Amino acid sequence: MSSTLKKKRNDLITTIKRHQEAYYSKDQPKISDEAYDQLVAELFSLDHELNIPRSSTEKTLGVGHKKRDEFFSVEHSTPMLSLDNAFSFDELDLFFKRVTDFIKKNRIDFVPKYSAEIKLDGVAVSLTYMDGELKTAATRGDGLVGEDITDNVKSMNGVPEVLNLKSKNKSNITYFENSIIEIRGEVIFSKKDFERFNKYQERASEKLFSNPRNAAAGSLRQLDAAITKSRPLTFIVHGVGKTSGSITDDLITHSSFLELMESVGFKIIRPRIKNGHPNIIKDYINQILNIRESLPVEIDGIVVKIENYELQSMLGSTVRAPRFAIAYKLPSETAITEVIGIDIQVGRFGTLTPVARLKTVSIGGVNISNATLHNEDELRKKGVKIGDRVEVRRAGDVIPEVVRTVNTSIRKSDNSLSFEIPKFCPSCGGKTERLEGEVARRCISGKKCPAQFEQAFVHFVSKKAMNIDGLGTKLIQQLIRENLVNALDDIYNLKYFQLEKLDRFGAKSAQNLISSIDKSRVTTPAKLLYALGIRHVGLQTAKAICDALTCFEELFSLAPEKLALIDDIGPVVMFSVSSFFETRENLELTKRLLNEVSFKKEVFNKKGVFAGKNIVFTGTLRTLKRALAQELVQKNGGTCSGIITKKTDLCVAGEKAGSKAREAQKMKIKVIAEEEFLAMIDKNI
Ligand code: IVH
């Protein structure tokens, strides 16, 4: 064996062990899972070169970590193994082929079926039930011996203390009598609970966890079980270890086992595939990839298992992993790269956002060269300096972000530069401020600041706003630079000859732009309101506001009390809207815009419980003043009149209602009492 290769191999093993320790024992991984897998793969390829059998290296590495001393030890009746990985459909096909080859070779008359479920990124736990009662709970430990965490697990969400056979026709006792079953699963923290919990920790100046898995591990392995019980942990079943007694006969397939477990009080993984064929499994993987972001839990892959337990046991396991299952690993969402600079971006409302310029790195097939550092506080907390190596995350459509710095110990002080958020706006040079309770520093120059104006423009033309096709950021910058637009409505005065002269703009593109600008002139009030870019007014809020209006101009002198009547409008939005229209330039801009655009017909007041209905009030209303009642009708899409006609849809009769109510009854128009009228609104708003 060459001594350099041998040394390299030993060094690799030491590094891997160090990372195992950091990951398992300290719950503070130093590198991403993918980087870890790469190290292990490198070691195996060295072994291949050196002719060292893989199984001996696997033994050296172990499947988990060394247990901590403080807990009692629990020996697992059957080892808690790891899973082999597939990183592509080709590798997954190799797994399916190995199974069919095995079947052929052993002349088993069987078409294998597979289950597929998400691979939960949590902490593996084994629960042992005797005669239907929870006896012990243990962590995986080194796979053979784990830590006794029975007290920590008792009363955890998803852990029944007694197995309850509601759906079976056998009594609990006889069914589980003389039986032992080891139930394997994952203890997890949901994404939502993780965020909430970290916020709570931050407020209490306690340790923050870097992801839900670490939070679950840290919360579970507490010597004080009361701490574990105070954390929002859930146990989810994914497998079975040793069984003995009557229950064993009922275990035929993996999916039927899970269903049995669900019927006795456990939680199981959903969505899942049962009795699937390879193509169905691949479809499921693709679907999960698409919805990964919206899943309530963190996942790090998809586990494919042979359904039939008999076939599973025929295939058996290696020392490390079973041969009947495989983990399809999802593409990593993080990567490590270097910060080559930090820029400040000025947002639409003047927020200064530090953005790291990165040495380009590919994450999940997409090249990333910028990542947000969010704000002054985050920048400080993460301590990112120019020249640092950082972990960057890209998840779905979310803007890539810097998660943390890595290897700061090897940071060369002369190479890394600290960075402070500037006190003056890098775009306009104006003053910035950071209000109490806000995390970000903001430039206070408003639309006079070129960066803010540019962003306001980008927003104005965007799809959900005025939807002007073909007007990207580069072109907007050019229009501003050439002084062709100084206010948002200038877009509607652009002339063909002005556009034609622009860089890289021909007759055709000029014509196209003019026609998409014209197309945008017919819009809806909500889109126009949203396009104005009022702080805190998203499209949904703009819709809610416009639904309560009878015309757009009503906004100019809208009493805050009226805005407050609109559903979902809190004081912050209310203040933002009213102060926007109190500013002269904004008011004038909106008026000019109203001259340029027109609204699709009948867009106001189309929604609500009285949409399109005509209502007549008669008699004295007990709780409402007549004017307020009429306003409520309008707000809910209806109109009011003083007399009953053929067009009347509803008559609301208060006390001492007289001829109008009688008239309505005669004409078979529905007459309701004030209470009913109020109830209709309550139900609907
Ligand atoms: S089946 C022999 N199914 O992943 C182990 N494991 O990397 C068979 N895991 O130790 C386990 N979700 O703790 C299985 N749906 C799932 C899983 C899952 C997460 C964990 C499990 C295991 C580790 C292997």
Image (cartoon, grey):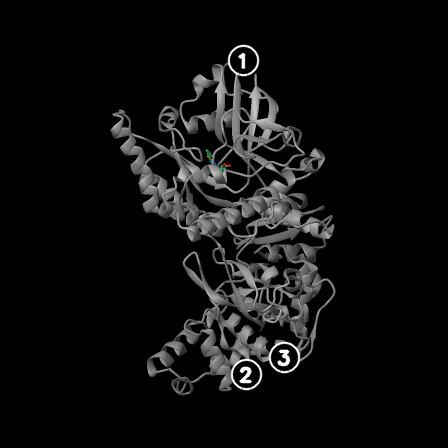
Q: Is mark 2 within 8 Å of ligand 1?
A: no
| Mark 3: few/some/many CA within 10 Å (<14, 14-19, 20+) | few
Q: Which of marks 1 and 3 is nearer the N terminus?
A: 1
Q: Is mark 3 within 8 Å of ligand 1?
A: no
Q: Where is residue 252 in the image (x, y as percent from the top left)?
A: 40, 23
Q: What residue type is labelled 2?
A: Asn
Q: Which residue is drawn at 72% across and 52% down?
A: 203
Query: Disc 1 on helix, strand or loop?
Result: loop
Kindly identify which residue carries mark 2.
486
> Disc 3 to disc 2, how far (Cα)?
12 Å
Query: Disc 3 on helix, strand or loop?
Result: helix
Q: Which mark is residue 178?
A: 1
- Please indicate, yes or no, whether residue 561 appears anywhere in the rendered image: yes
- In the rendered image, the residue lying farthest to the top is 174
Mark 1 or mark 3: which is in front?
1
Instruction: Judge by depth and name the residue closer to the eye, 2 or 88.
Output: 2
Kindly identify which residue carries mark 3.
585
> Disc 1 to disc 3, how far (Cα)?
82 Å
Q: Where is residue 131 in the image (x, y as percent from the top left)?
A: 57, 16
| Mark 1: few/some/many CA within 10 Å (<14, 14-19, 20+) | some
Query: Disc 2 on helix, strand or loop?
Result: loop
Q: Which amino acid does label 1 sit on?
A: Asn
